[in-house]
Image (spheres, rainbow, N blue to C red):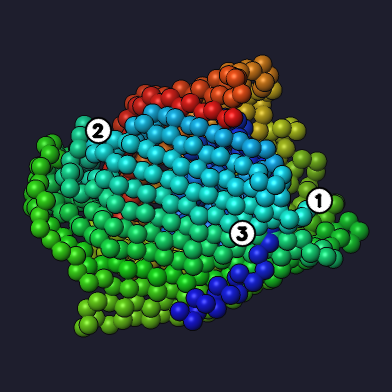
């Protein structure tokens, strides 16, 4: 508690925010035309590029703790309400240059929904997405209360869905943001929101045996019992502010609290699955009363100045978090061999949830960063941080040892870029980091346990080429090294070696012709495990769930040279085969999906409307996704959806 009060006081001591560009109205959102590179961007409910917040270069920035809100450190515990968050940008490669304290595996930078000078009311109604078909919609209002000085943004959303795997669920979102801009160069944002799931039945996950591959299951057949519905809430509260002071000084600060309450949750696991659909075992794990909560944030003092052609910046930062988890005490039901070809219709058992374990993390990091940009076309950036990290686990079992781990790492980053010729810039960067390892998966005997923090490092370099004024090509390579955690032969989740991801990535973005925009990306990845577990033959050298190639193409063609009412879009997503088990004897087949859509914009009375039909997975590709723990789930079938958006 003392640490929490100290952290809150330290981070809340100088809240301030610089103004930035106004948020687009919903009817004008288009992730393809709004993407600056192909490394990942989310706008509203649309995504483009190679990466997203849970998958960057084969790792997850969210799981690693590399998340920012409005550029400031935030410890995310689960998905945030879309009534609070407008979207996010993945920062790797050139997008991470000049970004304070970049992290190995990239940063997911979220933006907050906020009001502007003009009042806007937005309505959306749609028939779902490829993963969850069903009626959904939202209502949002952005209302100035005193011109640009004071305003409020608020919204509610709903979805009644039926998942790809069968089973129904409900999702609700709510959120509000209060923005205060007392003077030019100053802004304060206060926001809160909730993401709620109800009656969301467990998704069956298959762990395969042998090398025969997965069974040919009919998608949409509900194999989970009706009583395995999930009930959960994820709340977030935040204050973000930045203030321009005298003499080139700027104060930036953010304080965030987020909490996920798992009122009721289930895992539906089939083990020893063969190609004919039979299984060696079926286990359902029931949980209730678990939660994750984190108080986190950052305060910065920034000094900027210019000396001739040189622009420099020095930044002092204090960031930290106090995170608590309640986990364990689950009830597990074993049902023996079964078949995936029929629903067993298992009745709900009588059970009780045991006493929970507790997990606490306290971390305080202070650091300094310096940056230089020259009018002559070169830049340098460097940062140095020191952390005090403590993790303590209190097991409910009085006979179990309660481990406490401490760490005081020094992490650093350095990057540089130089303009070689007109339109040609080369860049290079190196960074070290400390981050959280993934928690043990549902199938592990030590389910939900979290290892201590791990140390990571990354080196990258590349070239950025302006092909035309409106079209940019980026080509780069990287190497990322981390400890490798996964399941051993006894299904215990622990460190099995070291993991290195070497890769090259390409990005082509911009406007090819007036009205024709492209976001194209390609990742070629060489992931490899080394260590005793590989040398002894316990596991193979390739990490489970990883691909060697991922390519994306997004095209958007708006008629009338980019000013017409109609536009047509295409999204192609292609993956190589994916490692399917720790022995590297099983692989999920390559898969490619194609989405085709259109937008029709029109005026009706005082409103601006958008009609958006979309066919996802046009050729009905049947593929399999594989988790890092070896769980297989099939991909979504072809789906036709329609969305209507109205701004007033």
Q: Residues within 10 Å of mark 3 (few under 14, many from 20)?
A: many
Nearer-the-camera pick, 43 or 388? 43
Residue 105, how many percent across, how many down? 52, 57
Please give the label number shown on residue 120.
none
* Sequence-earlier tag: 3 or 1: 3
Find out whether the residues at labels 2 and 1 contact each other: C-beta distance under 8 Å: no
Which residue does the numbered mark 1 point to in the structure image?
377
Q: What element carries label 1?
A: loop
Find out whether the residues at labels 3 and 1 contact each other: C-beta distance under 8 Å: no
Nearest-to-viewer mark from 3 and 1: 3
Find out whether the residues at labels 3 and 2 contact each other: C-beta distance under 8 Å: no
Q: In which quarter of the image is the C terminus?
A: top right
Name the residue rendered at 41%, 65% in the picture: 293
Residue 129, how many percent across, how many down? 39, 33
Left or right of 518, for residue 390: left
Nearest-to-viewer mark from 2 and 1: 2
Please give the label number shown on residue 219.
2
Residue 474, how many percent across, how many down? 64, 42
| Residue reaching furthest to the right | 308
Nearer-the-camera pick, 609 or 556? 609
Nearest-to-viewer mark from 3 and 2: 3
Q: Is residue 581 above or below residue 251?
A: above
Name the residue rendered at 44%, 70% in the picture: 323
Quadrant in the picture for residue 646: top right
Alpha carbon distance from label 2 to label 1: 54 Å
């Amino acid at each position: 508690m003392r640490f929490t009060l100290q952290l809150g006081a330290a981070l809340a001591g100088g809240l301030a925010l610089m103004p930035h560009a106004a948020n687009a109205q919903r009817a004008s959102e288009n992730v393809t035309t709004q993407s600056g590179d192909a490394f990942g961007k989310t706008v509203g409910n649309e995504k483009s590029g190679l990466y997203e917040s849970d998958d960057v270069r084969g790792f997850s920035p969210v799981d690693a703790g590399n998340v920012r809100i409005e550029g400031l450190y935030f410890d995310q515990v689960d998905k945030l309400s879309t009534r609070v968050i407008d979207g996010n940008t993945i920062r790797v490669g050139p997008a991470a240059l000049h970004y304070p304290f970049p992290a190995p595996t990239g940063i997911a930078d979220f933006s907050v929904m906020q009001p502007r000078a003009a009042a806007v009311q937005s309505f959306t109604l749609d028939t779902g997405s490829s993963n969850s078909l069903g009626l959904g919609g939202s209502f949002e209002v952005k209302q100035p209360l005193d011109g640009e000085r004071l305003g409020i943004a608020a919204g509610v959303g709903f979805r009644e869905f039926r998942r790809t795997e069968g089973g129904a669920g409900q999702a609700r979102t709510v959120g509000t943001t209060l923005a205060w801009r007392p003077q030019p160069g100053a802004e304060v944002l206060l926001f809160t929101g909730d993401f709620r799931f109800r009656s969301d039945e467990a998704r069956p996950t298959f762990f395969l045996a042998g090398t025969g591959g997965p069974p040919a299951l009919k998608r949409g057949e509900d194999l989970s019992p009706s009583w395995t519905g999930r009930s959960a809430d994820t709340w977030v509260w935040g204050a973000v502010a930045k203030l321009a002071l005298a003499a080139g000084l700027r104060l930036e600060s953010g304080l965030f609290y987020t909490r996920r309450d798992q009122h009721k949750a289930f895992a539906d696991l089939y083990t020893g699955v063969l190609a004919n659909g039979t299984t060696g075992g079926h286990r359902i794990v029931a949980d209730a009363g678990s939660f994750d909560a984190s108080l986190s944030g950052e305060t910065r003092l920034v000094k900027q100045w210019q000396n001739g052609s040189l622009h420099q910046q020095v930044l002092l930062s204090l960031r930290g978090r106090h995170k608590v988890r309640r986990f364990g005490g689950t009830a597990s039901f074993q049902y023996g061999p079964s078949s995936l070809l029929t629903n067993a219709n298992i009745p709900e058992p009588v059970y009780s949830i045991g006493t929970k374990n507790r997990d606490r993390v306290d971390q305080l990091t202070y650091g300094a960063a310096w940056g230089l940009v020259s009018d002559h076309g070169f830049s340098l950036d460097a940062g140095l941080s020191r952390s005090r990290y403590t993790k303590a686990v209190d097991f409910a079992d009085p006979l179990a040892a309660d481990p406490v781990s401490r760490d005081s790492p020094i992490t650093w980053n350095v990057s540089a870029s130089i303009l070689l010729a007109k339109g040609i810039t080369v860049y290079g960067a190196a960074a070290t980091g400390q981050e959280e390892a993934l928690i043990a998966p549902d199938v592990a005997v030590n389910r939900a346990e979290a290892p201590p923090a791990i140390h990571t490092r990354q080196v990258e370099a590349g070239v950025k080429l302006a092909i035309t004024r409106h079209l940019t090509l980026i080509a780069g390579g990287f190497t990322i090294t981390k400890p490798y955690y996964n399941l051993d032969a006894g299904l215990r989740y622990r460190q099995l070696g070291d993991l290195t991801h070497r890769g090259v990535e390409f990005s082509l973005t911009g406007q090819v012709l007036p009205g024709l925009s492209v976001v194209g990306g390609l990742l070629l990845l060489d992931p490899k495990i080394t260590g005793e577990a590989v040398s002894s033959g316990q596991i193979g050298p390739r990490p489970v769930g990883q691909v060697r190639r991922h390519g994306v193409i997004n095209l958007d063609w708006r008629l009338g040279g980019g000013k017409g009412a109609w536009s047509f879009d295409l999204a192609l997503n292609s993956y190589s085969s994916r490692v399917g088990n720790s022995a590297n004897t099983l692989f999920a087949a390559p898969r490619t999906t194609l989405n085709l859509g259109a937008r029709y914009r029109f005026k009706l009375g005082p409103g601006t409307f958008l009609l958006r039909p979309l066919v996802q997975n046009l050729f009905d590709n049947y593929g399999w996704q594989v988790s890092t723990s070896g769980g297989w789930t099939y991909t979504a079938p072809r789906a036709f959806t329609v969305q209507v958006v109205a701004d007033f």
